[in-house]
Image (spheres, rainbow, N blue to C red):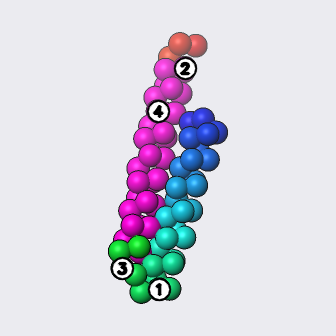
């Protein structure tokens, strides 16, 4: 996983947490849900990057 991918996923996760907290503080259920959705999307992207990294590690291990 490249640094830019990690940074982007982390930024999206933190943005989601901020939206969720703001939604809770203002009793805005839609903003809270949007924040949770952003966090979920970031987690899915991060999981996909981990799968790519694992596949690359396996490929590199077989080519040695």
Q: Are marks 2 and 1 in contact (CB under 8 Å)?
A: no
Disc 1 is placed on an element classified as loop
In the image, is 8 to the left or to the right of 37?
A: right
Name the quadrant of the C terminus: top right
Say whether disc 4 or disc 2 marks the residue closer to the N-terminus: 4
**Height in image: 43 above or below 60?**
below
State how far apart marks 2 and 1 are (Cα). Answer: 50 Å
**Height in image: 12 above or below 62?**
below
Magenta-drawn segment: 32-61
**Label 2, on which residue?**
60
Q: Quadrant of residue 27?
A: bottom left
Say whether disc 3 or disc 4 marks the residue closer to the N-terminus: 3
Dot 4: few (<14), some (14–19), or many (≥20) neighbours within 10 Å? few
Dot 1: few (<14), some (14–19), or many (≥20) neighbours within 10 Å? few
Say whether disc 2 or disc 3 marks the residue closer to the N-terminus: 3
Which numbered disc, 4 or 2, marks the residue closer to the eye? 4
State how far apart marks 1 and 3 are (Cα). Answer: 9 Å
State how far apart marks 4 and 2 are (Cα). Answer: 12 Å
**Height in image: 14 above or below 26?**
above
**Label 3, on which residue?**
29
**Label 4, on which residue?**
52
Disc 4 is placed on an element classified as helix
């Amino acid at each position: 996983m490249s640094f830019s991918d990690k940074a982007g996923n982390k930024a999206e996760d933190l943005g989601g947490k901020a939206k969720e907290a703001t939604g809770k503080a203002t009793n805005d259920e839609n903003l809270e849900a949007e924040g949770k959705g952003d966090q979920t999307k970031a987690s899915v992207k991060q999981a996909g990057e981990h799968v790519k990294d694992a596949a690359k590690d396996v490929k590199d291990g077989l080519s040695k």
